[in-house]
């Protein structure tokens, strides 16, 4: 039953089907749909699907059969009468046509026809994927027609598969041009969608929002919260950025359960809309089919003999009676644990899979660390995983957030002397993940470290054991390295 309860609270990711428009008021998303999700149906049938799901917005794609007794396909070739009937269908279904894409033109005249069509249909933007050399023309037309342009990213060889290339192009253009970020294509191409969105902050107009089964080319769409994308972190980032664009739900996986899976995505987004930033970051949004309420687990007699819902616990007692250290070397005063010299601070209890959250404060040039799963506190160097704490510069595998001497963080975040910083460290089986000040900067698969004294990229490390062979359960410790270091708000949740 404990595992069942964990399912209620732990799932994290969000990325799979659709369209989400972040509302300026109410704190939650409006949910929409990329019409490609139902590309085996007509546009009129897709609008009916959106309406039945409670989806408010839709992005059309070029070439979809119109249906509804109308000949032809969706696009600029529709005559005035057909356009009017399409808009009437949308009004009657209470679904807003918000955008159109992915669409591309050839010469300037073709692009003008697309922009004129978008203006006539009262669209907010068009989603495109043109050659880089076409972007200045689109910038000009966006201003002329009052229609924004969102650049989509398919996988390689599209230049936009690399978010750094996209950012470099956007830096030369006005804010009339941004991106429609396809999180699924990023993930399948090995790019972390959260990191990519952070890089493109301020230029995201829309998202084709997807969760996928694996970070590989053949990864397929899955319901939000059940795949490998950090959907909680993704939504938290959008919330922090006060994102007001659209996250377009787009299912490309041809599953016979597509209606159920799209509906599950809608439900997930509704639950996520009411979650706090901390809940999103820690994956505390219940996945579809699971309850987000403790009482539901006990309803109808369920859970009579089970444990209560696990809550984060203080790692150390105020008197440090559950810690091991040299007397006088650490003190706990006013909620802060401070090093006074004389060695490390260890838990007496061992932990396997867990989420550890804490805050730390450094002095200038402080060097410290958080030890995980230590199996031998006397010879800890070769029997523990160290998440580095450091104020100042150092080689990449020794800066703050690194797995010391093994794995550098994705970027170096400055640590200012005297300021509090936060860590959220997750240890789950072979995976170690580190968030520093709300940003995931380190993700380590211990099984990739197969050889003592060697990292997967061939660089040396100082450890006598391969990290894949380290104990998967052990004690947690805090390092004293001869310089001031303070910790507070230290909490752990066993997984």
Image (cartoon, rainbow, N blue to C red):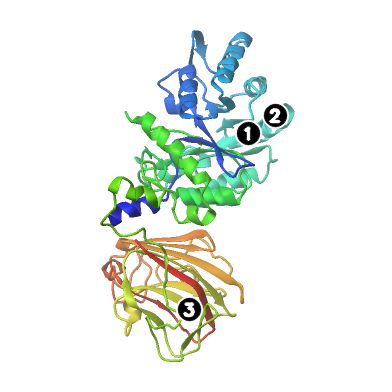
Is residue 196 among the parts visible in the rendering? no
Q: Earlier in the sequence, mark 2 or mark 1?
A: 2
- Tell which tag, 2 or 1, sits nearer the viewer: 1
Residue 283 image offset from top left, x and y in percent: 44, 53
The N terminus: image quadrant = bottom left
| Residue marked by disc 1 | 149
Left or right placement of residue 205 versus residue 210 in this view:
right
Q: Mark on residue 159? A: none
The C terminus: image quadrant = bottom left
Residue 376 image offset from top left, x and y in percent: 30, 80
Most extreme residue toward the front is: 301
* Residue found 39% across the figure and 69% down from its top: 406
| Residue marked by disc 2 | 141
Label 2's element? Answer: helix
Q: Where 495 falls versus 222 (above or below)?
A: below
Few, some or many residues within 10 Å of mark 2 (<14, 14–19, 20+): many
Most extreme residue toward the right is: 144
| Residue marked by disc 3 | 368
Front residue of this view, candidates 454 and 485: 485
Gap in angstroms between the C-alphas marked 2 and 1:
9 Å
- Tell which tag, 2 or 3, sits nearer the viewer: 3
Label 3's element? Answer: strand
Gap in angstroms between the C-alphas marked 3 and 1:
47 Å
Is residue 167 among the parts visible in the rendering? yes
Q: Are marks 2 and 1 in contact (CB under 8 Å)?
A: yes
Left or right placement of residue 329 versus residue 29 in this view:
left
* Residue found 61% across the figure and 44% down from its top: 243
The image shows a total of numbered marks equal to 3
Left or right placement of residue 178 versus residue 211 in this view:
right
């Amino acid at each position: 039953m404990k595992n069942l309860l964990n399912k209620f609270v732990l799932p994290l990711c969000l990325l799979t089907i659709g369209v989400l428009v972040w509302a300026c008021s109410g704190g939650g998303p409006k949910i929409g749909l990329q019409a490609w999700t139902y590309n085996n149906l007509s546009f009129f049938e897709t609008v009916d699907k959106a309406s039945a799901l409670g989806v408010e917005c839709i992005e059309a794609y070029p070439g979809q059969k119109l249906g509804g007794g109308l000949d032809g396909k969706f696009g600029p070739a529709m005559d005035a009468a057909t356009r009017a009937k399409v808009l009437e269908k949308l009004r009657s279904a209470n679904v807003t046509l918000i955008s159109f894409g992915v669409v591309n033109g050839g010469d300037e005249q073709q692009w003008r026809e697309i922009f004129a069509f978008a203006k006539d249909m009262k669209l907010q933007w068009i989603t495109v994927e043109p050659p880089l050399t076409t972007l200045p023309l689109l910038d000009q037309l966006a201003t002329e027609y009052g229609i924004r342009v969102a650049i989509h990213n398919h996988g390689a060889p599209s230049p936009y598969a690399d978010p750094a290339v996209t950012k470099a192009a956007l830096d030369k253009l006005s804010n009339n041009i941004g991106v429609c970020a396809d999180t699924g294509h990023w993930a399948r191409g090995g790019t972390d969608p959260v990191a990519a969105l952070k890089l493109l902050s301020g230029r995201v107009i829309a998202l084709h929002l997807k969760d996928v089964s694996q970070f590989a080319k053949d990864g397929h769409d899955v319901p939000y919260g059940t795949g490998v994308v950090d959907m909680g972190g993704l939504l938290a980032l959008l919330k922090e950025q006060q994102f007001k664009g659209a996250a377009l739900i787009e299912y490309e996986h041809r599953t016979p359960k597509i209606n159920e899976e799209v509906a599950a995505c809608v439900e997930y987004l509704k639950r996520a809309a009411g979650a706090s930033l901390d809940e999103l970051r820690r994956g505390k949004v219940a996945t579809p089919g699971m309850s987000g309420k403790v009482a539901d687990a006990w309803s109808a007699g369920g859970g009579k003999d089970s444990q209560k819902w696990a809550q984060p616990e203080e790692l150390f007692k105020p008197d440090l009676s559950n810690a091991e250290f040299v007397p006088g070397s650490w003190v706990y005063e006013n909620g802060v644990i401070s090093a006074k010299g004389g060695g490390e601070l260890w838990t007496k209890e061992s932990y396997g899979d867990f989420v550890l959250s804490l805050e730390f404060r450094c002095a200038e040039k402080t060097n410290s660390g958080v030890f995980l799963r230590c199996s031998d506190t006397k010879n800890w160097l070769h029997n523990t995983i160290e998440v580095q704490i450091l104020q100042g510069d150092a080689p990449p595998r020794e800066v703050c957030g690194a797995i010391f001497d093994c794995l550098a963080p994705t970027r170096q975040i400055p640590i200012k002397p005297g300021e509090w910083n936060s860590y959220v460290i997750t240890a789950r089986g072979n995976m170690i993940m580190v968030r520093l000040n709300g940003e995931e900067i380190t993700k380590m698969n211990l099984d990739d470290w197969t050889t003592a004294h060697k990292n997967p990229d061939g660089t040396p490390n100082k450890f006598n054991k391969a990290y894949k062979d380290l104990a998967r359960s052990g004690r947690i410790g805090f390092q004293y390295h001869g310089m001031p270091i303070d910790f507070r708000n230290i909490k752990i949740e066993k997984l």
